[in-house]
Image (spheres, grey):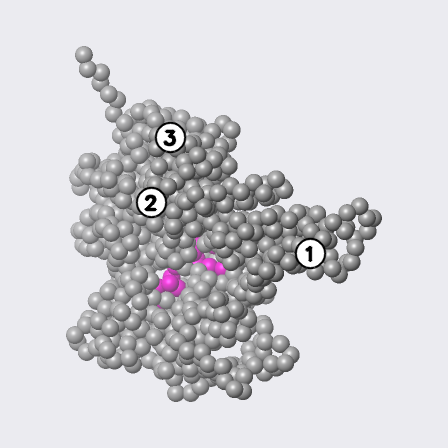
Amino acid sequence: MKTLQKEKTSLILHGHFYQPPRENPQTGIIGKQLSASPYPDWNERIHADCYSANSHSRYLSAYRRILSMTNNYAYLSFNFGPTLLSWMQKEHPQTYDLILEADRQSVQRLGWGNAIAQAFNHSILPLCTKEDARTQILWGLDDFNRRFGREAQGMWLSETAINPMVVDLLAECGVSFVILSPWQCRAISKDESSIEELNGKPAPYDRPFLLQGKSGKTINAFFYNPQLAEGISFGHFLRDADQLYERLLAIRNGDKVQLIHAATDGEIYGHHEPYGDMALAALIKKVNDRDDFSFSNYGTYLASHPATEWAHLHEGEEEKGTSWSCPHGVSRWYRDCGCHTGGDESWNQKWRTPLRKAFDNLSQAIDAIYPTEVRRLLGDQVQPASLLHAFAPVASELMDMQTFLAQYSDNREVQVQLAQLLLAQKYKHFSYTSCGWFFNDLAGLEPRQNITYALMAAQLCQQFNGGELMINLLDDLSKAKANRKQDGNGQSLAMESLQQLKGEVEAALYFTLNRRIANSIDHASTYGYFELESFALQEDGSVNLVVLNKQSLVCYECKAVDLHPAAMQLEYSMTIQGSNESEEQIYYLDHEDINLRMRDELFDQIDRTVCSFDQSQIKQLSKNLGHYASLATNIPYLPMGSLYQELIGSSLQAIKNLFMFGALAMWDEFKGDFTLMLDFFIKYGKQPDLDLIQTLFDNQMTAMAQKIQTYGLYNLNSRFVLEFLDIIRKRGFQPNLTAIQDAVYPYLSMQKQLPQSTDVDLINKLGDVLNFDIKITGL
C-alpha cells in the first residue's frame, strides 16, 4: 500500500537589494561618509552587514561553533540594483561572483532563476516620461542579461510603483511578471463581468494575476502576503527562525494555500535586523530538512501555475499610479503628501514639488538637445533613441566609452561630443533616483546627491546651449526650501556642490601628491574615472601631467607648481586645459582641497613609506629590544624616556612592515622577532598603540583570506594562520575572523578541491582554530 506524500507548499521570500548611486559624478569615487563609521561609506557598511553576510551565512551549534555556511541567495528570490552591482563588482568581486553563482544554482535546482531585474537607477517609473521609463526598463534588462547570462523574466519596479503606461512598457520589453503590494490592488475578476471589489482588503497572495495596460498589453503580478512581509520588515520575525517557521506553518494550515510569499527590502537580512541573514540560513536548513515547504521562485511557480484571473489596480492620486510605501499612490515623490521619515514634527516636504519641477525642466531641455546633436554628429544612420538604449552597458560600467563609441565614429572630436551627450542622459536619469524624495528634508544626503547629478548633466550640455541649462536649473532649485534656514535652498545646496573641485583638478592634485608622497611601488595610474597618461618632473620643480577622463574621453594637460616647496605646505597652482576647451584654467589649491577619502589614501601611502624596514633593520631592532628589556628588568623607573618612545615607534613600524610587505614569505625567518616585538609592545605600549595593533591583525586576516580566495588553501598559508593566531591569542588579541572563515569554509566542506599535497590534519586543525565544528574525512 502506497503512502500518499503530502504536497509541499511553495515558499518564496524576495529580497530587494538596492543602494542609490553614491559616486561623485566628477570622479566616480564615493566620498567618505562619516555617518557610516567605522566603514568609509554606507555601501561598505551595508556590504559587511548584509550583502557579504548572506553569501556566507553561518549556522551555529549550541556552543556557537560554525556547523555550516549557506549562500542564502541560492534560496532567496532577489534583485540587485545595477548601480549597486557595478560598485560591488569593483570593490567586492567575491561577493559579486557568489551572487551570480547562486542564481545559476537556482536555475539548476528549479529550472528558473532566483534573480530578477530592476529598473536601472530606481526612478519612479509612473512619474517618468514614457521614453525615460522605457530607457530605465531597457537599461535594467540589459544589465541583468549581461551579468547573469540569461534573459530576465521578472522586474522589480522602484518602490513597486506602477500604472498602465508602465504595464505596457514592461510587456513591450518582454517582462513577464512584477511583484506588488496587496494594497495596490482595487479589485480582482475572472472576466469583465465578474469584478470583485476588494474594498480595502489585501489582494490574494496565493496565485498570480494578469494586469492589463493602457493599450491592452498584459503582464503577470504577484501580490505578497502583507502580514508576513510586515512581520519580517518591522515585527522582528528574523530574531528567531524556529518561531518564523511556526508562523509559516500557521499561515499554511490556516489559509490552505499552495504558495506563501513575501517581499521586503533585502537589507533587512542582516543590516536593519542584525544577524537576520543567520535567521534566514537557519530557516533554509529547517525547510530543507522537513516536508512542509520548498523554497521556490516566481518564475518557477508561474511556469506551473499560469494566471487565469485579472487584477485591477488603484489609480492613485491624480491617476499617477500606486506604490508600496506611499498610501497616496506615488505622491511621495513629487509633493508634500504627508509621508515623511523622521525629522522635526514641524518640518514639511513642500520642497519635493519644486525639486522635481527643476529636474523636469532640465530633463526637457536635455531631451531637446540630445536628438538634434546626435543627428548633427552621426546623420540619419543612427536613431538617437537606439543609440541611447545601446548605451546601457556603458551606463552599467560593463563596457568602456571608447570601445562603445568606436562602433559609431572614429573621429575623436565626434566621440567626445557623443560621450558628453550620452553622459548627460545618464546623469539626468540619476537625478531622478527615488531616494532624493523619500526622506524628510531637502538638505539630506540623498537630495543633495540628486542635485549633484543634475548639475553634472547640465555641465555636460553647456557646450551645446551656452550654459543656459545651468542658469535655469539654479533658478528653479532656489524655489525648493530646506526646513532649517541655515540649510538654505536647492540653489545654495547646488552652489556648495559647484564649489567642489572639478574631477580633472582633483585627479591632477591626487597624482601630483601621490608621486610626491609615496614610494614608487605605490605610484598610481588611475583615480576614479581618470587615467594618468604621462607625468614629468621639470627642472624648475614643476610637474607636467596628461590626464584622461575615461568617461567623457576629454584629455587634460596639467601643470602643477608647488608655491612653497621649502615650507612643505602643499600649496599648488594648477593650470589645466582640456582637449575640447580653447582656454586654460588656473586653480590655487591647498590642503583644504584634499578631500577625506584622498587624505586617507595618502596617509596609507605615507605609512607604507615610513614602515619600510629591510631585513637587517628588523633583526637589529629585535636585538635592541632584547637588550632594552634585559636592562629594564626590576628597576623602579622607565629608563631613557626618549629611547622608549623610539623603540615603541620602531616596533610598530617593523610589525606593520612585516605584514604590509609579505608576512607569509618572511614568516619563518621573522616570527621570533615578531613575537619579541609584540611582547615589548604589550609591556610598554599605550592603549591607542595596542588598538592600532589590533586593527593591523584584523587587516592581516582579511589579506590572508584574499590570498586563499585567489590562490587556494595550501599547507604554507594554513600553517601561518595557525601559528599567527596562536601567538596573538596567547597575548589577548582576537582578530576578526569573518573573512578568513569565509575563505576556508569551501575547503572544509569539500566544495573546493584541496591541492594533492595538502595535509588534511593541518586543515582540520585550522578549521578548529577558526571556530568550525566540521572536519574533512575520507580523503
Amino acid at pointer 1:
Asn
Q: Quadrant of the N terminus?
A: top left
371 left or right of 614 in image? left
Depicted 424 relative to depicted 666: above or below? below
Q: In which quarter of the image is the C terminus?
A: top left
Q: As drawn, which residue projects farthest toward the right?
A: 636
As measured in the structure, the alpha-carbon distance from the residue carrying label 2 to the one carrying label 3 is 35 Å
Q: Is residue 446 magenta?
A: yes
Dot 1: what SS? helix
* Residue at image location 23% in from the left, 44% down from the top: 220
* Residue at image location 26% in from the left, 72% down from the top: 405
The residue segment tinted magenta is: 428-447
Q: Can residue 369 be seen in this view?
A: no
As measured in the structure, the alpha-carbon distance from the residue carrying label 1 to the one carrying label 2 is 58 Å
Q: Which of marks 2 and 3 is nearer the N terminus?
A: 2
Residue 252: name its quadrant: top left
Amino acid at pointer 2:
Phe
Amino acid at pointer 3:
Thr
Callout 3 environment at 10 Å: few (<14), some (14 to 19), or many (20+)? few
Residue that carries the numbered disc 2 in the rendered image: 78
* Residue at image location 35% in from the left, 46% down from the top: 98
Dot 2: what SS? strand
* Residue at image location 74% in from the left, 59% down from the top: 643
Residue that carries the numbered disc 3 in the rendered image: 777
Question: Which mark identifies residue 624?
Answer: 1
Question: Which mark identifies residue 734?
Answer: none
660 left or right of 371 in image? right
As measured in the structure, the alpha-carbon distance from the residue carrying label 1 to the one carrying label 3 is 48 Å
225 left or right of 149 in image? right
